[in-house]
Image: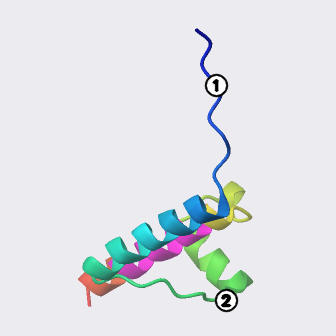
Amino acid sequence: MLKRAPSPPTDRDRRREQQRRHRLRQREGRRVYPIELDGAILDMLVRLRWLDKSAANDDQEVARAARSALLDAAKNF
């Protein structure tokens, strides 16, 4: 018997997943904030080795680096 390929996620599926992640962050006391970063901040992340220069245009990598740098600063505050 042939198996059907899974259908792409619907808007409802995507919203359900967003809500699941939101509730998980809420339980863990985390929040998501949109922030604007300029070239000076990206340069700082690269100089401090939180971000590889080749990843400076990758939004996910920049977000990861910024989060890691902020967590490190908070732990050492």
Q: Residue 50 in the image: state x and y as whole percent.
A: 50, 66
Please name which of the two marks, 1 or 2, marks the residue nearer to the observer: 1
Q: Is residue 54 above or below residue 33?
A: above
**Residue in the image at 61% along x and 58% along y:** 52
Report the residue that reaches farthest toward the top: 1
Q: Residue 2 in the image: state x and y as whole percent.
A: 62, 12
- At numbered mark 1, what does the secondary structure look like: helix, strand or loop? loop
> In the image, is residue 67 part of the stretch drawn in magenta?
yes
Decide which of 7, 27 is in the foreground and name it.
7
- At numbered mark 2, what does the secondary structure look like: helix, strand or loop? loop
Q: Residue 77 in the image: state x and y as whole percent.
A: 26, 91
Q: Disc 1 designates what residue?
A: 4
The amino acid marked with disc number 2 is Glu
Quarter of the view holding residue 56: bottom right
Q: Is residue 49 visible?
A: no
Q: Assign the N terminus to one quadrant of the image.
A: top right
Quarter of the view holding residue 8: top right
Q: Residues within 10 Å of mark 1 (few under 14, many from 20)?
A: few
Residue 16 relative to residue 39: left or right: left
Give the dominant element type of the magenta stretch: helix, strand or loop: helix
Q: Residue 29 in the image: state x and y as whole percent.
A: 28, 84
**Residue in the image at 51% along x and 69% along y:** 18
The amino acid marked with disc number 1 is Arg
Q: Is residue 5 above or below residue 30?
A: above
Q: CA distance from mark 1 to mark 2?
A: 43 Å
Decide which of 12, 42 is in the foreground and name it.
12
The image's colouring method is rainbow
**Residue in the image at 26% along x and 78% along y:** 27
Q: Disc 2 designates what residue?
A: 36
| Range of magenta residues | 61-71
Badge count: 2
- For the residues bearing labels 1 and 2, Cβ distance under 8 angstroms: no
